Amino acid sequence: MQLQYFLLLAAALFCIGIFGLITSRNAVRVLMSIELLLNAVNLNLMAFSNYLDSTLIKGQVFTVFVITVAAAEAAVGLAIVLAIYRNRDTVDMEQFNLLKW
Amino acid sequence: MNLAEGVQIVSFAILAAMMIGGALGVVLFSNIVYSAFLLGGVFVSMAGFYLLLNGDFVAAAQLLVYVGAINVLILFAIMLVNKREDFSPSANAGLRKLFTGLVSMGLFALLSTMVLVTPWSYSDTPAASQNSIVIIGEHLFSDFLLPFELASVLLLIAMVGAIILARREYLPDQLSTSKLPQTIFTLPERPRELVSTTSITDRNR
């Protein structure tokens, strides 16, 4: 197994996440795309820590931190989506213009 | 991981197919419940990749946190926001999707050429697969101590913020006076239009 396979796979996952982040209209699906992006970064970190830094596995420590931040981000993001849905009665990203003129 | 090379390649191929297919399904399905369950599949296959990369503790944390917590949270949010609405079609949605697809493919081409061209300096020491938990623990309590504590503070702040953002405002007087049997179980919630009027009357009084 080579390092390049994992990096290519992480790049593909990142690009799929970028595509979903830009094109999706549902706010919950945008949060799911952000989770895909964070997972791609985690796969990169794990691959680097296994192939390039296999004695001091600092990449795994960073992956644990990224998982923590992702959990916090998901909780706050879904709470924001619920609050917006309660106020605006929609989850359409095109109609979230509260802070835009 | 002490697996044979062929076993590793076959499991890598299966996990890669699961992950790419699941991610495409997450992005492209129109029903968002299917997307949420496929996202769970993507997380599970990602834990399999971590096992292939000698990260057993991180694979367990991935299963616990992502599949057990975040995916269930997303499913609950979908059920709470479950209003079937047909989004009004925007003016040039097809053009936007085409352009975004082109940008994503270009980004993937850029990243893949970078990955394939760069000469990586592999470390020749064998992977420490037996005691990765010990090494991670030593990192967390020696040179990553400050980020570890900051992560705990961040989790506390996120919990308080999520509760404050998502809570409803109760009406305790209406709860005590209404003795009628409720047929529809709804959480009591302050009506949105009346908030400004009550504050105005309070101010006039």
Image (cartoon, helix red, strand yellow):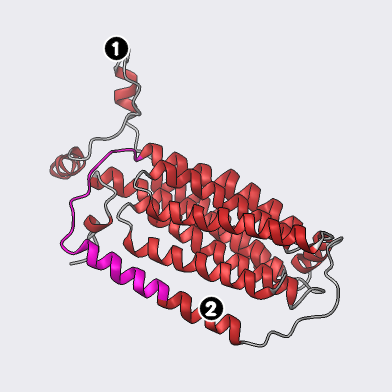
* Image: B39 above or below A34: above
Q: Are marks 1 and 2 on the same chain?
A: yes
Q: Residue at x 18, y 54 (%)?
A: B89
The image position of residue B200, as x and y in percent, is 15, 44
Q: Residue at x 86, y 61 (%)?
A: B131
Tell me the magenta residue range.
Answer: B81-105
The image position of residue A11, as x and y in percent, is 53, 71
Placement of the N terminus of chain A among the 4 image quadrants: bottom right
Q: Is residue B200 left or right of residue B32?
A: left
Helix, strand or loop at mark 2: helix
Mark whose residue sits in front, 1 or 2: 2
Q: Is residue B138 left or right of residue B195?
A: right
* Image: A99 above or below B38: below
Q: Chain of mark 2?
A: B
The image position of residue B110, as x and y in percent, is 48, 81
The reply to whether callout 1 and callout 2 are in contact (CB within 8 Å) is no
Q: What kind of residue is marked 2?
A: Ser
Residue position marked by numbered label 2 in the rendering:
B112
Residue position marked by numbered label 1 in the rendering:
B180
Placement of the C terminus of chain A among the 4 image quadrants: bottom left
Q: What kind of residue is marked 1?
A: Leu
User: Does the magenta run of residues contain B82?
Assistant: yes
User: Does the magenta run of residues contain B94?
Assistant: yes
